Image (cartoon, rainbow, N blue to C red):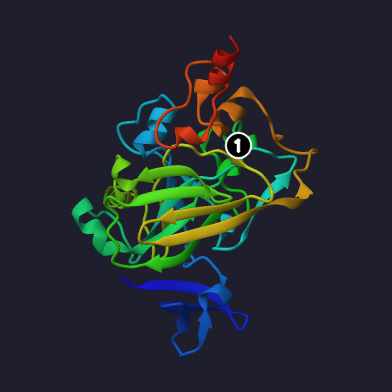
Amino acid sequence: MSEYRRILLEGYPTVVQRHGDELVAGDGRRIGIEDAIHLSPVKPRKIICVHLNYKSRVDEFMTKLPATPTYFHKPITALCGHGADIVRPKRCKWLNYEGEIAIVIGRYCRNISQAEAGDYIAGYSVSNDYGLHDFRDTDAGSMLRVKGSDTLCPVGPALVTDWDFRNKRIRTLVNGTVKQDGNTNEMEWDMHYLVADIARNITLEPSDLLLSGTPANSRPVEPGDVVTVEVEGLGSLTNTIVEGPTAIRDDVGHQPMTTEEVVSTAMGGDWEFRGIRAPRGPGSAHYKSRLEDDSESN
């Protein structure tokens, strides 16, 4: 496996390769990993994400997978890198992490089979598909403002080549505490399927990103929280949540809400807020259910 990163080197975006604890540019310049300012490892023209893919996430929401995947789109302005601040706008409070793996396209790709898909993948990276659920009640399912707000797509720190996605652990930690803990074997549709599916009628271009889904236990975070996504063999992506300098304008458009749909989605499904059951599945021990509180008080 090889590991490539994009960093600011002497003020310019530069592709570097990792050699031990150093990053080395093509002209031989070197910088320590801890001293580097990271950018997203690639500059995509498209960021496409699958809705549901991990079994634990499906079980958590007490739902069923569709017969085939469904997708949404994140604008390029949502992209940022390892170490970047993740902005929660003022007047919003339901910002959730979703640890994921990003597929990085390496060649122009259209109308290919699953068996061919691996030949069109440059490599993989760690990603975090943040969602601003205050806008969950609008945009008719496209989730444009939920998923597309600025900075809500950190990717990195590296593009890793020749990585086998099968049976790999993926975890999300908040302030050092594990919140999501899953495995790629949970995925209903693997990386090759997703690439072949999208490429049937959408041309994928070099550096395009496909985010492949998240396991159970996405939950809200607060300004000051430090969120790390770890993927076995790909490394760790760390970002800090900050409050934005400006508030969402209240004189135009749909406003941030705290409806039942917003809260139940942000907190992992309707099970808790409609009194169906306590949370379950991988990572459920990290969350204390209100249902359990109610049963203890009776």
**Residue appearing at x 61%, y 84% in the figure:** 10
Q: Classify 220 as above or below 40.
A: above
Q: Position of residue 167 (x, y in %)?
A: 28, 50
Which residue in the rendered view is the most extreme toward the top? 298
Q: Classify 34 as above or below 52.
A: below
- The answer to whether residue 210 is visible is no
Residue 244 falls left or right of residue 86: right
Please name whichever residue, 38 or 34, is drawn nearer the observer in this view of the structure.
Answer: 34
Q: Position of residue 139 (x, y in %)?
A: 58, 35
Which residue in the rendered view is the most extreme toward the right? 251
Q: Classify 13 as above or below 231.
A: below
Label 1: few (<14), some (14–19) or many (≥20) C-alpha neighbours in 10 Å: many
Quadrant in which the C terminus appears:
top right
Quadrant in which the N terminus appears:
bottom left
Element type at mark 1: helix
- The answer to whether residue 153 is visible is yes
**Residue appearing at x 55%, y 38% in the figure:** 219
Please name whichever residue, 233 or 135, is drawn nearer the observer in this view of the structure.
Answer: 233
Residue 162 falls left or right of residue 33: left
Residue 55 falls left or right of residue 252: left
**Residue appearing at x 43%, y 39% in the figure:** 51
**Residue appearing at x 54%, y 45% in the figure:** 97
Q: Position of residue 164 (x, y in %)?
A: 27, 59
Q: What amino acid does circle 1 point to?
A: His
Please name whichever residue, 127 or 71, is drawn nearer the observer in this view of the structure.
Answer: 127
Q: Which residue is mark 1?
A: 133
> In the figure, residue 189 lies in which quadrant?
top left
Q: Position of residue 150 (x, y in %)?
A: 63, 53
